[in-house]
Image (cartoon, helix red, strand yellow):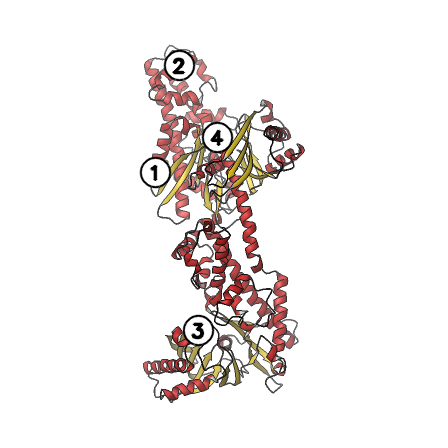
Amino acid sequence: MLQVVKGRMLQAMHKGLSRQTHAQANVRMLPTYICSTPDGTEKGDLLVVELCQSHVRTMWVTLLGDGNQSPQVMYKIFSMPGDIMQGKGEALFDFIAQCVRQFLAGISSPQHRLPLGFVFPFSCRHTRLDKAELISWSKGFSCSDVEGKDIVQLLQSAINKQELYHVDVVALMNDTVGTMMTCSMAGKPCEVALVVGTGTNSCFMAMAQQVEMAEETSGQMCVSTEWGCFGDDGTLSDILTPYDQCVDEESSNPGEKRFEKLVSSLYLGEIVRHVLTALAAEKALFIGSNVAVLRTKGVLKIQQVLEIIDNEEGMAEARRALEALGLRPSERDCCRVQQICQAVVSRAATLCAAGLAAILSHMCQSQELKRLVVNVGVDSELYRGHTRFGEILQSVTELLAPECMATLLPSIDGTGWGAAMVTAVALRLAAQRHEVDQVLAPLRLSRADLQRVQALMRQEMELGLGWESNANASVRMLPTYVCSTPNGTERGEFLVLDLGGTNFRVLLVRMAKDGIHMASKIYVIPTTITQGTGEVLFDHIIECIMDFQLKHNLTEQVLPLGFTFSFPCQQLGLDKAVLLSWTKGFSASGCVGQDVVQLLQEAAQRKQHLGLKVVAVVNDTVGTMMSCGYDDPKCEIGLIVGTGTNACYMEEMQNVGAVEGEQGRMCINMEWGAFGDNGCLDDIFTDFDRLVDEKTINAGKQRFEKLISGMYLGEIVRHILLALVEKQLLFRGKPCPKLQIKGIFQTKFLSAIEIDGLALRQVRAILQDLELQASLEDSVLVREVCQTVSLRAAQLCAAGLAAVVEKMRENRGLAQLAVTVGVDGTLYKMHPW
């Protein structure tokens, strides 16, 4: 039956977490906006106010940032006038504010800003840590004009009335959350809490993306289950006894808080009383006694029930309690009353265990763990007053959730101390957030920044196209002698070479009526060759071609050859291209200033390979535009975002200053990776970008590419992470030797870390491979850094592309331009966003 109850609790929790079903849920699963537990670095003076059943408690806490080992605490309790609980809301908050004023007057507090944490043990709908509307009163409170109002605002206004303008209410929480934070003090985080007192509730740290009622989507968030209302929809009717029905009918809220009425100390004495009344009526107990007293509500207190359960003194306590009611119990009566009390309290413990097991199983499943190891903070007069309650809670939880290992921790000071921790953590996170924002601010570009980049790109394009101004342009705007895009009728068999990175591809392409057929092989080019001599590089290329032709029986054929050569070249014709500079880590000597077709043919002669007929040298952007153009005639732009970045587009011949002729169009290879090499992007470049640039083999060159392409993004992230570690904002400021290694944080990690819905556990696993011991908060921050760097790269790419399409539209005198952009490159293809 307890497994069934656990299953129903899990269903109720899922209903409460979902935006679609939340309104109908009994277990409300309210977000608290508490996103972290203490880490021991919290310090400063804090004020706490706790609203209790019959009093208000005020506390002054000083934390020293020493792992919270020796906090200094002063507190004072103010008895609450009885009429306040049912009076006006304004009177309640005025009374609380007066308590704060008296308390501060008594300890001569300094007048600097004093953050206050408020423990308000009622159901509230939070929209921030310091903004929460009361859903409903309970526990005997029913002050007017408070439900639906912001509790923080009501308290802050009352405090301001007392002219305590230096006191700021920064956090509001319920007692359960306070318990969890209190128990996080022993150097280990506590991620679940359970309160069983006059009421009952639980809370736990959930994965933020599962809390659909909150705006936060990354990291964790503490959820207050509000499980006291579990069963209000009838899901517990098969375990309710006639005694529970009687207790419910006599309560101030019949039909509500059904779970609470089965487990909380406010009701257990009443359940026992109804059982005794029923048994006395059947003459099974108190024969010869006047049992009318048992019909009086409240004659049996929970404290008496707990004392009766005590095995050694229990019988004597039972006799004392019963005789005090005017009953004359026999030895057998006392024994049976003890059994009844044990049964009622044991049932409460097992039901609490079923609820706790549901929470633990949910946490285990949502984090995709085989085994969950977690600390559970418990604040309960039943737990404190009766060791058997704790034993049952522990053993039944283990039975119902065997995949979870939960350690129960008794709360030190319950809620007040926990409230101080919530407040301290909130202040720590706010300070850290401010520092993180300062570090990342230079990478966050506004729309105005991007419009300026677009305008600068347009300016550099015009310079690059001009015959006289070309030499001063950072965007070279190289004519390709490609003057037409495909129309789909092209046929034939071709050999293709593709050189543009660490891999070299040879392809056989057959274009037929029934489509394009390709065979290809990838050959690796070692760094020793890419950074050796030009002769060795081109000899290696010819060897790869010969190997490919041999494997495909092409040694006797001379096929037209297209050479994709993805480096900046000045084309003097379709089959003649002079290398202007190496990029992407290449630096082979004796190539810059040479015609790459000539270098290829010389290598062929050296290797006695005479069947090469090079028809076209093509940049990879042009290749991309043409291949996409075969399927879509509107494709007139090619864009590469991979190891490097570049773009090409169809420009009007009349605007191409380097080539004679006014008619038609020609594809222009922009070589936009060098945009900014003349200093025009210096204010976009951050310190992190400069650190990356300085360590490249072409420092000061390809500046735009170094902001965007896959070869550099991982390095930018690595430098940002190092800065955050140095500022003690990441990995607790511990040194990370592996992170000091250039190239260790590859761009593929960004792509993996940014996958939507990727559990933070998997992010932590990626970081663990780099020997980085990341907490959940660390994982959230690393993901944010990756997102910031990727977003900037994509936005800068977009600003460049906007300049291209705008120029094409104006060239053609159109109000609107419909154009397709062919895109290739590992970063574009592999990155989720």
Q: CA distance from mark 1 to mark 2?
A: 37 Å
Find disc 4 in the rendering and name its residue: 199
Label 3 or label 2, whichever lies nearer to me, is 3
Q: Badge 1 is on which residue? A: 398
Question: Which amino acid type is marked by label 2?
Answer: Arg
Cβ–Cβ under 8 Å for marks 1 and 3: no
Distance between the Cα atoms at labels 1 and 3? 56 Å
Nearer to me, 563 or 107: 107
SS at badge 4: loop
Disc 3 designates what residue? 501
Q: Amino acid at mark 1?
A: Glu
Q: In terms of sequence position, does the residue under pointer 1 or pointer 4 come before the other?
A: 4
Are circles 1 and 4 on residues that touch, CB within 8 Å?
no
Across and down, in percent, residue 658 comes to: 59, 84
**Can residue 720 be seen by looking at this rendering?**
yes
| Residue 346 at least partly seen | no
Asked which secondary structure carries label 2, the reply is helix
First-in-chain label (1 vs 2): 2
Residue receiving disc 2: 320
User: Mark 1 Cα within 10 Å, few/some/many (few <14, many 20+)?
Assistant: some
Please tell me which residue lies in front, 722 or 294: 722
In percent of width and height, residue 240 lies at 41, 30
Task: Look at the picture and state if 33 lies above or below 447.
Answer: above
Mark 1 to mark 4 CA distance (whole Å): 24 Å
- Residue 483 screen position, x and y as percent: 55, 83
